[in-house]
Image (tube, grey):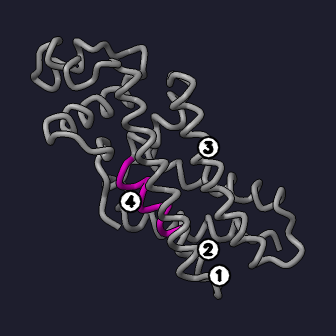
Amino acid sequence: MEKQTAGGRGGSKRRREILDVAVKLLAKHGYHGVSMDDIGAAASITGPALYHHFKGGKEQMLADALIPVSERLLAGGRHWASVHSEDPQAALEALVDFHLEVVIDSPEIVILHLHELDRLPEEPRREVRKLQRVYVEEWVGVLCRLREGLKPEQARVLAHGAFGLMNSTPYLSLGQEVSADETAALLRAAALRALDPG
């Protein structure tokens, strides 16, 4: 699947560039550690021009970063569960591969999801959480088809545990001690073992 930028909801190329800069700063310094002036300086844009692109300021930037990646996860989850609807083991492996692709491609977005979601206003925060819940249910359906006798509530525990493992990638030194490909392979194997309740 094609890599999606932080500005995946569309807009001008310049707007997407500004959002990518904002995402990197917010992930590195935290929501309250970055001002609109900081973002403007890093993106080489003045304050008024910055608000022209993002009238809602940092809150809008955060929503425009987090909602598209949640939409991407759900679309991918539905796709792979459907493609392998007759083979739940293949579906599970495809879901793990897809999730790892997203988190390795977009480590800053993962950090924002984990630490800054509560900074969103109520409506976009509700939208992100709804998308996440539906994404989890794609995993639950696959796990329950794969593991006879597994209850949905148990499958949710397993899915969230695997997400925690795979979502650790932003905190690893990818490409330094272990390559991104090797990291993905190690986490893939670990996630598949974690998802086997036997």
| Amino acid type of the residue tagged 4 in the rendering | Val
Residue at which label 1 appears: 89
Residue at which label 2 appears: 92
Q: x, y percentage for residue 146?
A: 74, 79
Q: Outermost residue, right direction?
A: 149
The residue located at (61%, 66%) in the rendering is 190
Residue at which label 3 appears: 130
Q: Secondary structure at mark 4?
A: loop
| Amino acid type of the residue tagged 2 in the rendering | Leu
Q: Earlier in the sequence, mark 3 or mark 1?
A: 1
Q: Earlier in the sequence, mark 4 or mark 2?
A: 2
Q: x, y percentage for residue 66?
A: 44, 39
Asked if residue 103 lies in the magenta stretch, the reply is yes
Q: Earlier in the sequence, mark 4 or mark 3?
A: 3
Q: x, y percentage for residue 106?
A: 37, 49
Q: CA distance from mark 4 to mark 2?
A: 25 Å
Kindly indicate whether the residue at mark 1 contacts the one at mark 2 (C-beta within 8 angstroms): yes
The segment highlighted magenta reads 96-106
In the rendered image, the quadrant that contains the N terminus is: bottom left
| Amino acid type of the residue tagged 3 in the rendering | Lys
The residue located at (73%, 71%) in the rendering is 143
Asked if residue 107 lies in the magenta stretch, the reply is no
The residue located at (63%, 54%) in the rendering is 134
Mark whose residue sits in front, 1 or 4 = 1
Residue at which label 4 appears: 178
Q: CA distance from mark 4 to mark 3?
A: 35 Å
Kindly indicate whether the residue at mark 3 contacts the one at mark 4 (C-beta within 8 angstroms): no
Q: CA distance from mark 2 to mark 3?
A: 22 Å
